[in-house]
Amino acid sequence: MSETEPVTNGTERPAETTAGETDERTREAWREYEFAGETKLAVEDLDVYYGDDHALKRVSMDIPEESVTALVGPSGCGKSTFLRCLNRMNDRIGTARIDGSVELDGQEVYQDGVDLVELRKQVGMVFQAPNPFPKSIRDNITYGPRQHGDIDTGLLARLTGRDDSEAADRLVERALRQAALWDEVEDRLDDNAMGLSGGQQQRLCLARCLAVDPEVILMDEPASALDPIATAKIEDLVEELAEEYTVVVVTHNMQQAARISDQTAVFLTGGELVEYDDTGKIFEDPESQRVEDYVSGKFG
Amino acid sequence: MIHVPREEYQTALGDLRADVLALGADVVDQLEAGLTALDTGDEALAREVIDADAAINDRYLALESDCVDLLALQQPVASDLRFVAASFKILTDLERVGDLATNLGEYALSADGESGDVDVDAIGADAVDQLETALAAYESGDPDACRAVAARDDDLDALCQRASEAVVRDLLERETGDDSWAAERVLDDVSRLLLTVRDLERVGDHAVNVAARTLYMLENDSELLY
């Protein structure tokens, strides 16, 4: 935070308080805000350390179901770390230490005995770069359900008369339709997925995620590697998916957050969640001057 | 010190603010000149006011276009967004005040300088003051001044109401007998006075609009908008 307030158009708030005091008031203001919808994920006092690096500091926020929550902030602010905490992807990082609580439907995610495979089925993830398996389009979709035992199309299954291929076909079509990819690939389901365009690959990854019937979909910069047309398709999908799923999206694209999300959480350097509110409020009248500066493109 | 990387954008915001204020100052000048022409019957000044309106309109359109460019190209958010949105609306009010000043010029051309019991100067001074206060609030970012403009508008409205009643009362008291030419002149005077009062009352309304948009810009507060 600067000592001198920027002078642009005479609308800045007076700088009578320090950044710390202002942020504390801000935090109180937004924590009183009640989002529409039931809480799907409740995060309380979450701290994440990578070795000595305190990557996320006492983050608390409730993520409502059937809505889109955007996480924005500069690189290194901890938003991807936060996202990965929601389905314990950080467990895979040896130096990571996590304190605090994450509850999914009221059940603690960070407790002994949680089945991580089941957790990640419930809380699926789509990454920044499309990462389809070097397999057929069909196999990409059925891979997850097969791992979870939801469908079985293997040789043994056929020999024992448990051929689920029809169910698999239905599932492939459902997932691809949900990801708005079906019309483009229905005639080439056995082609290698690596032959798809980047945008198609990303929608395939989304379809792969949807195939296991998740409840929450985490997306880490899902459109940053895509052209504007492919980006628009992903954005449309995100909004459609929010009718049924809880979607949490990390994005660097502020306008994208404004377009697609219902609520926006702004993380700033140092792993702090500075403000979390209705997206309209964040982009029209944020409480925190630091958030105002960040979303307006004035960086401290 | 906060690093402000979007230099062109910041410059455009600053320019817009300065241009809105410059237009506002010129519209106030127009209004004052219109009132002077009405008071003194200075025909040359009245024509100057009328002729200057085209330039005001051109500047208004250019600034409106600047706002659209800023929205489309720079995608302002938060207080910047409210600033551009408020300015966009304020420009319309200023342009309308310019039109009302032109009306005063036109009334001046046909008036004989006689306004009976109506103190047009006092009403005009009040209207001008309202607009100047609203513009000063926009310039300095003063929410209290915005609310003060809105509160004071009731006084101006009451002043205008009393003035209109005085004009009508004056009309009823005049005796023109069978002199149809005199009757027509009285009607002209009365209509012109009523229109003058109405236009000045509207200047006050536009000043309130400027204040209301400024309050929205400053505090995201819509209490003065209606």
Image (tube, coloured by chain):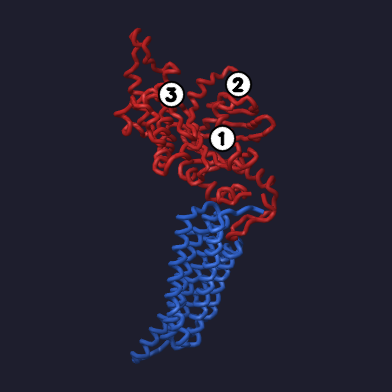
Chain colours: A red, B blue
Q: Which residue is mark 1?
A: A80
Q: Nearer the viewer, mark 2 or mark 1?
A: 1
Q: Residues within 10 Å of mark 1 (few under 14, many from 20)?
A: many
Which is nearer the eye, A202 or B215? A202
Mark positioned earlier in the residue sequence (3 or 2): 2
At which x and y percent is residue A186? 31, 29
Secondary structure beneath label 3: loop
> Split into 4 quadrants, where in the image is the N terminus of chain B?
bottom right
Q: Amino acid at mark 1?
A: Ser
Q: Residue at x 63, y 55 (%)?
A: A13
Which chain is indicated by disc 2?
A
Task: Judge depth for marks 1 and 3 and give the one in front.
Answer: 1
Is A281 above or below relative to B130?
above
Report the chain holding disc 1: A
Amino acid type, mark 2? Gln
**Residue B187: quadrant of the picture:** bottom left
For the residues beneath circles 3 and 2, the answer to whether they share a chain is: yes
According to the image, label 2 marks what residue?
A111
Residue at 45 percent across and 33 percent down: it is A130
Is any atom of residue B168 visible in this view? no
In the foreground, A192 or B16: A192
Q: What separation in Å lies between label 2 and label 1 (alpha carbons)?
A: 22 Å
Q: Position of residue A176 (x, y in %)?
A: 36, 29
* CA–CA distance in space, label 1 to label 3: 23 Å
| Number of callouts | 3
Residue at screen point 44% across, 63% down: B65
